[in-house]
Image (cartoon, grey):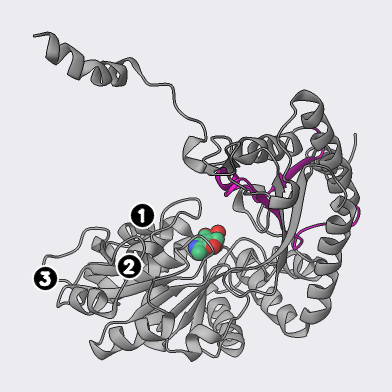
Amino acid sequence: MESQEQYLRNWLDAHRVVNASGTMTSLGASSVSPEVAAAVEVALPYFIDMHELQAFASTWIARLTGAEAGCVSASAAAGIAVSVAACVAGSDMSVVEALPDLPAERRKQVVLQKGHEVDFGASISQMIRLGGASVREVGTAIGCQPHHLEGALTRDTAAALFVVSHHTVQSGMLGFRDFVKICHAKGVPVIVDAASEYDLRIFINQGADIALYSAHKFLGGPTAGIVAGKKELVRSCYINQSVGIGRAMKVGKESIVGTIAALRRWQSVDHKGLHREEYAKVCAIRDALAAEEGIHVEEVPDPTGNPITRLRITPSGGPEAAAQLASLLGQGRPRIVVRGHHVDLGFFELDPCNLMDGDVGVIVGRLREAAASMRAGKKTSTAGSLGPRKSGYYDDGVPAVDPLIVPWEFETPVPSARESELLDWPDRYNDK
Ligand SMILES: *Cc1c(COP(=O)(O)O)cnc(C)c1O
């Protein structure tokens, strides 16, 4: 009989995904480095006191983040829930055990800028509610002013949460330093969700009471979260995690050991060298596609300041063509998964961080193939000299909306029976 290892390897090889989308939970998060995997393997047979292991992790988290203390959680999402629980329950065991129900006299609101209520797979606000709090959104979807935040900080406020992500509204929101200043002036602790950020120190440096990171994103660790912050608050996080609501999001010794190994490795990674290698992959794909008909290729920096340059692929033919091209890449073996959350704007992106040896060639070959098949199937308009997002023009040169390109025309739903009834309503009214 074939070995366990061979048996699993066969399945994994047959189902491998080329990951051009970044670190995604749905694709297995990180490719764990061999040295981190080896550390996990060493730990698996041991019995150890988990509190001691977490204390060991705390020293490593403190060393790399500059925080007073830390603990490992099941994930950054779990970190949001337990740190909110820590802010509403503290280490009062009667409340820790009562969560997610809270005694009436407890402060229970967590303040969140409206433009930070994003979805990373689940929503930020759901994680807050899981921790026993209610969400108080401040500002509007496009803006938050100091007075919006100040006015929301009341005797009912337990904490304020700041989210760092390319998914948040990238302008008009309060910056981190202002956010902290306003919250601290009213004695409100600030939790920052920095799950996907490279810089492990900056938020603690700028006053975060708790900073949350994923161990399985850039750190290349196993699935886990990192909670770093003020000692008393981290202690409450740990209590809520071990014997409170966090018990349903238990973190095992393998994840804690793997997180320590990933943090230790992070210190000695040649970060610039790695960025250079990743950028070389971006350039290779860019150059290979430069002459491809009907595809516009452009380099874009990471919006939150991480050291990543991605490649934006904009096919002529608008959102429909972008969606079709992304979907064609996702078919066949291996599947190529791209960063597709903006296909409704007519483009998708390729992220170099998780590309393996040989993936560049696979991506270029399959992109060319897919683009050629789309050209053969349907003659789409070409980008031409006006660029990929040109509007249409009437014969006399006057701008006209091109229904193929404008996002609000994308997937125009067929009116349901009920909607068409409503549309008919004025006529029927007139008939009477
Ligand atoms: C990825 C991500 C999360 C979730 O992190 P997990 O560790 O996978 O739970 C939460 N918030 C943001 C901003 C993220 O990017």
Q: Residues within 10 Å of mark 3 (few under 14, many from 20)?
A: few
The residue at the point 46 percent across, 63 percent down is 168
The residue pinned by badge 3 equals 105
Identify the mark at residue 126; answer none if there is no mark.
Answer: 1
Near-viewer residue (412 or 225): 412
In this rendering, would 297 be left or right of 361?
left
Give the Cα distance between marks 3 and 1: 22 Å
Residue closest to the far front: 396
Q: In the rendered picture of this protein, how many numbered marks are placed on residues?
A: 3
Near-viewer residue (5 or 350): 350
- Tag 3 secondary structure: loop
Q: Where is residue 116 in the image (x, y as percent from the top left)?
A: 40, 64
The residue pinned by badge 2 equals 112
Which amino acid does the dot numbered 2 rest on?
A: Leu
The residue at the point 54 percent across, 44 percent down is 398
Q: Position of residue 49 (x, y in %)?
A: 55, 74
In the image, the segment drawn in magenta is 332-358
Q: Can residue 304 be seen in this view?
A: yes
In this rendering, would 210 be left or right of 378?
left
Which amino acid does the dot numbered 3 rest on?
A: Glu
- Tag 1 secondary structure: helix
Q: Residues within 10 Å of mark 1 (few under 14, many from 20)?
A: some
Identify the mark at residue 380; answer none if there is no mark.
Answer: none
Near-viewer residue (389 or 246): 389
Give the Cα distance between marks 1 and 2: 12 Å
Name which quarter of the figure residue 429 lies in.
Answer: top left
Q: Where is residue 98 in the image (x, y as percent from the top left)?
A: 23, 61
- Tag 2 secondary structure: strand
